[in-house]
Image (tube, coloured by chain):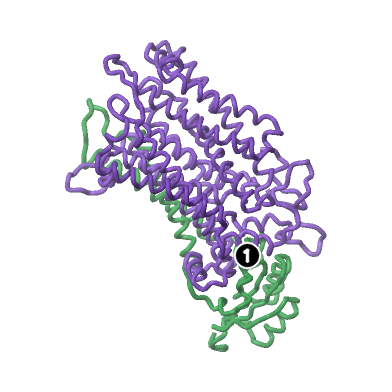
Chain colours: A green, B purple
Amino acid sequence: MAAYPGLHGLLAEFESPTALVQAVHSARQAGYTRLDAYSPFPIEGLSDALGFTRTKVPLLIFLGGLTGALGGFALQYYCAVISYPVNVAGRPLNSWPSWIPVTFELTILIASLTAVFGLLALCGLPMPYHPLFNVPRFALATRDHFFLCIEATDPRFDRAATNQFLAELSPREVSEVPQ
Amino acid sequence: MPQEIASPPARPGESEHGAPPVIGPGYTFRSVVDKISSITLARRTPGGWWFGFAIAFALTMLMLYTIGYLLIKGVGIWGINIPVAWGFAIVNFVWWIGIGHAGTLISAILLLLHQKWRTSINRFAEAMTLFAVACAGLFPLLHMGRPWFFYWLFPYPNTMEIWPQFRSPLVWDVFAVSTYGTVSLLFWYVGLIPDLATLRDRTKNRFVQVIYGILAMGWRGSAYHWKRYEVTYLILAGLATPLVVSVHTVVSFDFAVAILPGWHSTIFPPYFVAGAIYSGFAMVLVLAIPLRAFYGLQDFITQAHLQNMAKVMLATGLIVAYGYGIEAFMGFYSGNIYEKYSQVNRMFGPYGVYYWLLIATNVAIPQTLWFKSVRSNPPWLFLISLIVLTGMWLERFVIVITSLHRDYLPSSWAMYSPTVWDWSMFLGTIGFFFALMFLFVRLLPMISIAEMQTLLPASRVEHDGSAGPTQEKH
């Protein structure tokens, strides 16, 4: 970043998902590591091409569900056994079968909340400003065009050489992304 | 579900097995985006929209007027009394929440089953779920008599030093319905994020751009984000699937756990869930058929969608019919005079006409869906869906009223009849539901843009110049 102040990276624009995936493969083979691809819809194999195969989302959701289940049961146990025990003809206070529905619902609730807020947190959203939004044509990334960005923080990044490299991938155009 | 619909034909517009395609021919990424988003971004609102919204809005005002009067006078303005303490409120609650279930079924269960045809109907079916749950929630809330104390239902440390009774199905209901509402909202919103970004980037109006920009939260279609997004969406679907089954099961427990003849039955959970899906698909058809005609969306909501929904209706309708059969059989087979009488009273008592109407609307008439000519005729499908919706409402009416009005003790028997305020509340929620639907159709993309794009063959990556799209992964 220090080498190119004010520059976020170089952005190449493609017209098909296939061209984008091939460009990502080429960039990775050329040794670039700080890159990201943008598309209007999910493309199968694109994140694999970027070397991003595992996400923490499922683990977070599992932990959220576990919290919901244990917390939900503990809540009912506390209410019905510890804080406000009601003796109904000597029936057991720990009547766990009748607590399953609420335990289940809270499992789903906490897991789902974790899923959505975990997704947003891992993606760094909400993010109202991003350097890419400075490029007018980037508006097409949510429509019908496909973009590859090699960021200036990449150790192999060189303004001229990277520009040359991207131009060889036969994109529609290559543009600089101001910070 | 027929196999040929499961995987779309290699080229849209053509079909290998004679089944209609899930998207019309000749679409590109851009034309899909433009077609769906132009409905939302159009400057002029169509006159038909205003006409429909005006009616729905007037009925919404009727609902608010009824609620106002109810808060002043109390629930005595309704026809409820002892022994029929649950009248229209619970009938309408179960009816609305059941309608909501098809939205979750379409968005979650069909996603897990790789049913591509869900793509163009899942968005507004999810919206339908949300709005139906909103209508459903009003009824138990107002039936409480003092709705401003609704928070007493939640466990929170309070100066009265008491807690909710967690052994009661009514408390389970609070948790089930509020979880259902929350998860439906999350699922719907997560699905909307990429489309909101599309609208943000497409609009020319600065104000509209800022609004959609805030809602899209800075989504930019990064491959890292898409990967997490897809994983999250799939897991949410996996969570919503057992949830939707649990919600209507818990609703049925409201009845089945009670010891009243005609309610105390183990068939209730499965048959309530099937009935919920039945009425929900009917409502999706009632919404989809006019929408596709009015906005010219026949290429996106195709014959394949209508026919598949009709088939789901037929299948769930048969499960419901089986439920009625078993209920009647068990009434006589149980050897219990109260059970037996409750069944006889249901069929031939003072409310018997509603029972036979229910059999006609829910069991007999939908059998016409066996005929392909009926399934592929949108006006007929629309009519049958309306009949099914009526039938499912009658079902809840019969279950609630006939079991309550004559219980064990003949001296406490009484008749129930709804008042004008029962009807105004019910009609009012229908108006409220449609008013929200109208606003949704105008302000948000009613079909998922990003998902529709993935239906196009061009969205698949070709490997190393080999001709043709790659094999669909299952």
- Residue position marked by numbered label 1 in the rendering: A40
Q: Is residue B401 left or right of residue B456?
A: left
- Chain that bears disc 1: A
The relative height of residue B238 versus residue A53 in the rendered view (above or below) is above
Q: Residue at x 38, y 11 (%)?
A: B337
Is A104 on the left or on the right of A130, as rendered? left
Q: Secondary structure at mark 1?
A: loop
- Left or right of B373, for residue B220: left
- Residue B139 or residue A117, whichever sits in front: B139
Of B369 and B260, the residue lying toward us: B369
- Residue B434 placement (x, y as % from top left): 48, 47
Q: How many marks?
A: 1
Q: Is residue A104 visible?
A: no
Q: What is the x, y in percent for residue B96? A: 45, 39
Q: Picture quarter containing residue B287?
A: top right
Q: Is residue A147 left or right of residue B213?
A: right
